[in-house]
Structures are given as C-alpha cells and as structure tokens.
Amino acid sequence: MQELSFANKLSRFITSWFFLMLVWIAFTSTYATQELLTGAFVSGIIAMFSVPFFTCCDLSLFHPVKIAYMIWFLIVFIKALILSNFDVAKRVISPALPINPGIVEFKTQLKTNFGKMVLANSITLTPGTLTIDVIDDVFYIHWIDVQTTHPEEAFTHIAESFEKILLKIF
C-alpha cells in the first residue's frame, strides 16, 4: 500500500466523514443537535480509521462538474432501470416473448477499481443483467436476452451509457 500525504489523507478523511454523516442522517431521520453531534463524532472516528483502507475518493469528487455528471448518471441510471423493469415484466407476463439467456463479455475503459465497482453494480441493479465477474478490465455479464455475443456490441447495449458518464467522474 502506498503512503499517502497528509493533504491526501485529510481530503479522503473529509470525503469519508461527509458520506458517513449523510448515512447517519438518513438512518436517524432527525436534525436534533444531539443526534448531529453524535453522528459527527461517530462518523469522524470511523472515517479516521478507514482512510487508509476503504477510501478511494478525495475532495475532487465534490467539483461542481463532477457533481453535475453524478446527477446526469443518476438520471441515465433511473431511465435504464425503468425501461429494463418494463422489459423484464413483459417477459414474465408474456411467456411467448423470447428469452435467450447467456453470458457476454466486454472490456471497460474505466481505470479505477471504484469506477469499475460502480459500473458493475449499475449493471447488476438493472433488471435483466447481472455482473458475474470483473477480471482486470473485462466484465462478464449474464444477460436475460443475449442479442449479440460480439463484445463491442454487447458493451453498447449494456454499459456504454453508464461508462461514458463514469469516465468523466472517476
């Protein structure tokens, strides 16, 4: 593991603390001073110990352009989620619709493990697809209706819209 500079550690600590604090607020559902102070303290302790191990992102994640891309990613993801839910629901309701399950593979251009993880989870959360494995830059996806086994075409159908945005964030 490479040694982090103090500025990098501080940046990662603040980012971790911020997201842990959001989780605290989401779970407690309150803005009472005592709850927020307790959350700030507990989040700070957890962030302090987790910086060397679990934190991949620093304060650059809060750049306004990256935040705009995160919002755009959320919109694209929700659209894909809704469309794929309807597609899978049609296949369940109408058994006459063809299904052609299989495993496809494609390469990603994402370089960070965190970016690959976000892409893999986005694919898995979209009904009809399931990320089976990621080895280096190659994704193995179970697809409910394999339309092509050609890697570039499979990538276009499954992940291209997600990856275009993720490349600008990570």
Image (cartoon, grey):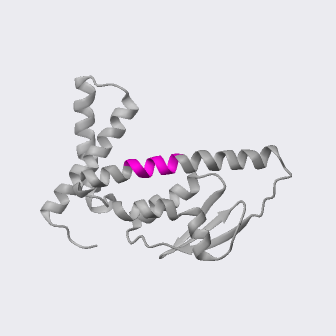
Q: Residue at x 36, y 53 (%)?
A: 69
Q: Position of residue 30 (x, y in %)?
A: 33, 25
Corner quadrant of residue 5: bottom left
Horizontally, is 63 left or right of 133 in the view?
left
Horizontally, is 102 left or right of 98 in the view?
left
Q: Position of residue 135 (x, y in %)?
A: 52, 75
Q: Position of residue 142 (x, y in %)?
A: 66, 64
Q: Residue at x 31, y 50 (%)?
A: 67
Say if the magenta span includes residue 63: no
| Residue 170 in view (yes/no) | no
Q: Residue at x 80, y 43 (%)?
A: 93
Q: Measured along the vertical axis of the image, is residue 99 above or below residue 89?
A: below
Horizontally, is 115 left or right of 98 in the view?
left
Which stretch appears magenta?
71-78
- The residue closer to the viewer here, 20 or 127, is 127
Q: Residue furthest right?
A: 96
